[in-house]
Image (cartoon, rainbow, N blue to C red):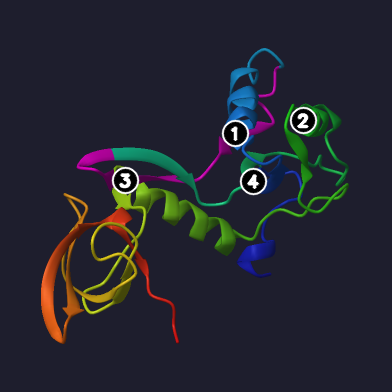
Amino acid sequence: MSQENAFSISDSRWYAVQTLSNKEGAVKRYLDKYLANEEMEEYIEEVLMPTETVTEVKSGKKYQKIRKFYPGYVFIHMRLYDDEGQINEKPWYYVKDADGVIGFLGGNRPTPLKKSEMDNILSQVQEAEGKEVPKVQYEVGEEVKITNGPFLNLNGIIEEIDPDRGKLKVSVSIFGRFTPVVLEYWEVERAEES
């Protein structure tokens, strides 16, 4: 028997639950908050909303926001089925009827996520823990279009990147000569492929 299928139907498994747009956090908070009140701890082990911290520097100020890896979904580690393979109605309705929940992935007979799928999700969460990533990531040598200031609409090539300050050194061709210009991330966008 393969590892993917080595589980009993009544074991705790990971299920994907679809939520309304931007309601993932509210669904997670609701499910976590009322686990004890509704006596759900024997069924639900964990509610996960995978995120990362994204930073952006605008006008010299650093801003942080949380970006969801899987917008519109939360993942729940739970015992959804009993020993006979029937859905445990108490946790089923607890999750399904939570405000903001559309339903389980798989409809009325949800299939648990494969171990390999969940391992990927959990490793993403672990890698993102305690780290900040820039909102947009550029590479040296990449062509960008300037969207602000005196060099508006000119294209240039990135020579240096300073992610801590959110600045780029871009080489811009002016009158046939390349001139280095220091710009903030928000003052450029990726040049369109021609």
Mark found first going from the N terminus, 1 or 3? 1
Eyeballing the image, is 62 above or below 185?
above
Q: Which mark is residue 55?
A: 3
Secondary structure at badge 1 equals: strand
User: To which residue does mark 1 refer?
Assistant: 45
Q: Residue at x 61, y 37 (%)?
A: 24
Mark found first going from the N terminus, 1 or 2? 1
How many other residues sit within 10 Å of disc 4, few (<14), some (14-19) or many (≥20)?
many
The reply to whether discs 2 and 3 touch (Cβ–Cβ < 8 Å) is no
Q: Residue at x 43, y 49 (%)?
A: 125
Closer to us: 157 or 152? 152
Tell me the distance, in whole angstroms, between the alpha carbons under discs 4 and 3.
Answer: 23 Å
Q: Is 108 contained in the magenta span?
A: no
Which marked residue is nearer to the observer: mark 2 or mark 3? 3
Which marked residue is nearer to the observer: mark 4 or mark 3? 3
Mark found first going from the N terminus, 4 or 3? 3
Which marked residue is nearer to the observer: mark 1 or mark 4? 4
* Residue type, mark 3 in image: Thr
User: To which residue does mark 4 refer?
Assistant: 73
Q: Residue at x 16, y 83 (%)?
A: 175
Closer to us: 150 or 26? 150
Secondary structure at badge 3 equals: strand
Secondary structure at badge 2 equals: helix
* Magenta segment boundaries in residue numbering: 39-62
Mark found first going from the N terminus, 2 or 3? 3
User: To which residue does mark 2 refer?
Assistant: 91
Residue 143: where, in percent of width, then height?
30, 77
Magenta stretch: helix, strand or loop mostly: strand
Secondary structure at badge 4 equals: strand
Mark found first going from the N terminus, 4 or 2? 4
Tell me the distance, in whole angstroms, between the alpha carbons under discs 1 and 3.
Answer: 31 Å
Q: Quadrant of the N terminus?
A: bottom right
